[in-house]
Image (cartoon, coloured by chain):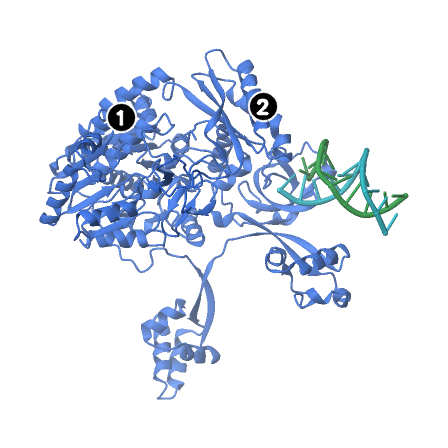
Chain colours: A blue, B cyan, C green
DNA sequence: AGCACGCCGACT
DNA sequence: GTCGGCGTGCTC
């Protein structure tokens, strides 16, 4: 038999199948989806068997055999292999990149080199500088370790010794998968024999008697730590019985449990509102029909979308099927996880970035080995290896984090629908503020639109007040809080209610500028201003990490009028304490949430009422649900309205709506105060009216006018290189080529410099394609890659193609 | 990506 | 004359 293998070498030339002989011993075990190690040229690489065949087109005598198997059972199912083919095509990525993205990081191959002494007789030949490193001929030394930790002389000596064949370099292919083991004990003898041995013990040996007694009742293996706790015994007592041949120790594999020790009280379905009921029934009807359908569930904040998801999943499970729930990373909060755990108990696996590699691996195996039926997670959870999917849910479907911005560039929504088609199951896209693309599709009837306009328990939508910061300035208020907001905050403090202050930092970072000559500190490697970091009193570049000290005098004019501009959460906190001296602020930003679990701690603290104000960035926009929050303040609503991105209005509307939704979710009514310099902008006006449809219509007009999605599809080609002339040259050629190839109705823009024209000393240009129908697109783009693959491999030239761009930078 | 093969410059 | 530069091409 022949195995068709995709090798782990991500290049254009190797992005195809390679044939390998399957050795006799592996005939039974090698199946599509399994990982193998194969000889590839002079080295060994990992690969995926994607198909089997009786024959090969390749010269048979040149075929090499598969060297070893990495898996016993294939990690990728047949469906995922089919999906990979589709995704490879759609995203223009390498097959291997797609296969790898479907598996948890721990399962990625690890290549390392080992240094061995080339036989006993070479031992005396070793130079004394490195002799101490090599103890004997049986222990290899890690090559990478040595390069890192050894000194220069040692590195040189080693290179020499390798050349003289005193030392041998052996490349090895391994994995990073580790399974957690636990020491267990179990009885060796039968029940009767245990009884006898127990009687034989001396009267004083109380602990041993207890232990044997335990195993008379329970014959199952039990972890040592567990039994010590249970019987208040000790390791030595167990050891004694092991020595006597009564018990034996062993190891069993255990799953790491990220939620170990946490108790989840099971919860029942909540009663549904009329609207929720209608939506649920519509979805269930589709589920039972066994036909694929994509639903767009638009439900205002607080309308109880999660409960609908939970009950829909429950139904899918009762039909013996499985479900995937995608949640944006940022809102994968403990609150959210708890809700699923309480409803579905041990049937849930959670996959998110806060877990360690090992924990993710174990959660993934729970899915693969059918120990769970529900997977809740961020983007990559869409590849959960279920084989009988009954439902896929994408919460907050408009979130841009569902788009992966590195190869393979995929959008989880597209993958979800593709899998939904395969399993003929419903896909539910939920949001209070759907993406324009999805809502347009729903209006066209491509998706099935279902709507929930009311909040549960008839809670009113919060009142939104817009304050014009220009007017505040005219009235002499130079602080970052408008008078309206300040008064509202004072009122909440009096009433002992809680406040959320939201500062959007995107496009609004702190920089330094000279008030005399206008000098702005910029990164020497990127065309962007440096950001002021208070923690270590430095200026940093967010794109390349460049760091420098803060100048005391202006480098431009030698003056001393260097000032800080913009405002970070720290600055807001300082200001806040100045105007409201007794206020207790809980600040949530990258600095205060860096440590694992700190996010949760801060929220808990706020939940317990140990803070009056929760001040934060994006991360507080979603999911938090505390009854005592009655005021939400948005400090700078338009900070991202002016970003060079056609979706900036949409993002502004979405974000403001999300944040507003944090206020007054329970009995107490909420108020939202939005500070802005552009109060007349429709994305801000429509937030005030809670009018998604109105916003949608206005934004659609603009998209139509400007030729953007959903009226046109986009593809973006990024070209970058250290040599500016080369970048311009290549981009120009690409644009020309596109114009000759693509149809007349397709528009090609460029070459133009990217909005950040230089990052890490590399110049960046781009070329944009807008099209409605373009059957030759993929083919043409592939041709471009092929044309430049040589140059890309040789020089530093890079061409990245995104067929569904979300980041316009 | 690695690695070998192969064809032109500065050295024992 | 050789050692070594990195351009080109292949890996079942």
Quadrant in which the N terminus of chain A is drawn: top right
Which residue is under mark 1?
Answer: A449
Label disc, if present, on residue A614 of the rendered structure: none
* Left or right placement of residue C6 versus residue A280 in this view: right
Which x, y percent locates residue A647? Answer: 35, 27
For the residue carrying disc 1, how many other residues have a C-alpha within 10 Å: few (<14), some (14-19), or many (20+)?
A: many
Which x, y percent locates residue A332? Answer: 32, 45
* Left or right placement of residue A322 versus residue A462 in this view: right
Which x, y percent locates residue A315? Answer: 27, 39
**At 34% across and 31% down in the image, what residue appears?**
A290
Pointer 2 indicates a residue of which chain?
A
* Residue at the extreme left of the image, as rendered: A495
Q: Is residue A597 at all visible to an observer of this figure? A: yes
| Same subunit, tags 2 and 1 | yes
Could you say which is closer to the camera, residue A600 or residue A172?
A: A600
Could you say which is closer to the camera, residue A364 or residue A583?
A: A583
For the residue carrying disc 2, how many other residues have a C-alpha within 10 Å: few (<14), some (14-19), or many (20+)?
A: few
**At 22% across and 24% down in the image, what residue appears?**
A680
- Residue A14, located in which quarter of the rendered image? top right
Quadrant in which the C terminus of chain A is drawn: top left
The disc, 2 or 1, on the residue closer to the chain's N-terminal end is 1
**At 67% across and 57% down in the image, what residue appears?**
A155
* Left or right placement of residue A538 versus residue A9 in this view: left
Q: How many marks?
A: 2
Name the front one of labels 2 and 1.
Answer: 2
Pointer 1 indicates a residue of which chain?
A
Could you say which is closer to the camera, residue A556 or residue A616?
A: A556
Q: Is residue A137 at all visible to an observer of this figure? A: no
Q: Mark 2: which secondary structure?
A: helix
CA gap, disc 2 and disc 1: 47 Å
Which residue is under mark 2?
Answer: A729
């Amino acid at each position: 038999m022949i195995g068709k293998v995709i090798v782990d070498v991500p290049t254009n030339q190797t992005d195809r199948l390679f044939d390998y002989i399957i050795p006799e011993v592996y005939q039974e075990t090698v199946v599509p989806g399994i990982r193998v190690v194969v000889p590839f040229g002079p080295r060994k690489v990992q690969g995926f068997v994607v198909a089997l065949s009786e024959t090969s087109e390749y010269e048979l005598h040149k075929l090499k055999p598969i060297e070893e198997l990495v898996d016993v059972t294939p990690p990728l199912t047949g469906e995922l292999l089919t999906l990979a083919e589709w995704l490879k095509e759609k995203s223009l990525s390498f097959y291997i990149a797609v296969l790898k993205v479907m598996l948890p990081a721990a399962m990625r191959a690890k290549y390392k080199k080992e240094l061995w002494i080339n036989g006993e007789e070479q031992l005396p030949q070793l130079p004394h500088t490195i002799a101490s490193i090599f103890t004997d001929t049986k222990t290899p030394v890690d090559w990478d370790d040595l390069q890192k930790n050894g000194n220069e002389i040692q590195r040189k000596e080693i290179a020499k010794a390798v050349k003289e064949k005193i030392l041998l370099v052996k490349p090895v292919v391994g994995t990073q998968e580790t399974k957690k083991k636990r020491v267990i004990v179990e009885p060796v003898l039968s029940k009767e024999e245990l009884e006898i041995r127990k009687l034989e013990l001396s009267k004083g040996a109380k602990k041993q008697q207890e232990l044997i007694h335990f195993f008379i009742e329970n014959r199952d293996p039990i972890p040592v730590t567990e039994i010590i706790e249970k019987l208040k015994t000790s390791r030595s007592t167990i050891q004694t019985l092991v020595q006597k041949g009564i018990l034996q120790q062993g190891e069993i594999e255990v799953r790491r449990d990220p939620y170990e020790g946490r108790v989840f009280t099971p919860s029942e379905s909540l009663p549904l509102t009329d609207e929720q009921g209608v939506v649920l029934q519509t979805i269930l009807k589709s589920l039972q029909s066994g036909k694929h359908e994509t639903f767009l569930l638009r439900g205002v904040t607080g309308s109880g979308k999660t409960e609908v998801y939970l009950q829909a999943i429950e139904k899918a499970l009762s039909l013996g099927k499985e479900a995937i729930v995608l949640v944006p990373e940022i809102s994968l909060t403990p609150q959210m996880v708890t809700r699923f755990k309480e409803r579905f108990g041990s049937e849930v696996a959670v996959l998110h970035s806060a877990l360690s590699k090992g924990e993710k691996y174990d959660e993934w195996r729970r899915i693969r080995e059918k120990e769970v039926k529900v997977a809740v997670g961020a983007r990559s959870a869409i590849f959960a290896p279920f084989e009988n999917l009954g439902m896929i849910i994408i919460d907050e479907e408009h979130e841009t984090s569902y788009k992966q911005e590195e190869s393979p560039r995929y959008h989880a929504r597209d993958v979800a629908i593709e899998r939904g088609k395969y399993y003929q199951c419903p896909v539910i896209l939920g949001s209070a503020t759907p993406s324009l693309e999805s809502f347009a599709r729903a209006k066209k009837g491509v998706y099935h639109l279902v709507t929930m306009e009311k909040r549960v328990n008839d809670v009113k939508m919060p009142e939104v007040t817009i304050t014009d910061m220009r007017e505040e300035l005219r009235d002499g208020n130079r602080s970052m809080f408008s008078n309206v907001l300040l008064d509202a905050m004072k009122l909440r403090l009096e009433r002992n209610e809680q406040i959320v202050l939201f500062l959007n930092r995107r496009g609004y970072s702190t920089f330094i500028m000279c008030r005399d000559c206008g000098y702005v500190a910029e990164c020497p490697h990127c065309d962007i201003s440096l950001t002021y970091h208070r923690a270590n009193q430095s200026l940093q570049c967010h794109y390349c990490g460049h760091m420098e000290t803060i100048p005391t005098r202006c480098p431009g004019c030698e003056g001393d009028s260097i000032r800080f501009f913009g405002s970070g959460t720290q600055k807001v906190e300082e200001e806040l304490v100045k105007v409201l001296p007794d206020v207790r602020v809980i600040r949530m930003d990258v600095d205060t949430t860096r440590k694992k679990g700190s996010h949760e701690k801060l929220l808990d603290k706020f939940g317990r009422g140990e803070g009056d104000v929760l001040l934060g960035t994006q991360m507080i926009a979603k999911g938090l649900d505390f009854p005592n929050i009655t005021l939400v303040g948005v400090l700078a609503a338009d900070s991202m309205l002016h970003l060079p991105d056609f979706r900036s209005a949409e993002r502004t509307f979405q974000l403001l709506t999300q944040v507003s939704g944090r206020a007054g979710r329970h009995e107490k009514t909420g108020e939202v105060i939005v500070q802005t310099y552009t109060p007349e902008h429709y994305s801000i006006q429509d937030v005030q009216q809670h009018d998604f449809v109105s916003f949608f219509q206005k934004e659609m007009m603009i998209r139509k006018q400007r030729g953007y999605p959903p009226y046109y599809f986009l593809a973006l080609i990024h070209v970058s290189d250290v040599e500016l002339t080369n970048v311009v040259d290549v981009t120009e050629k690409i644009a020309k080529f596109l114009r000759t190839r693509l149809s007349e109705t397709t528009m090609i823009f460029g070459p133009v410099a990217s909005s950040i024209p230089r990052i890490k000393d590399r110049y960046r240009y781009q070329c944009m394609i807008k099209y409605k129908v373009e059957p030759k697109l993929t083919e043409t783009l592939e041709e471009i890659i092929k044309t430049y693959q040589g140059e890309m491999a040789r020089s530093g030239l890079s061409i990245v193609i995104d067929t569904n761009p979300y980041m316009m930078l």
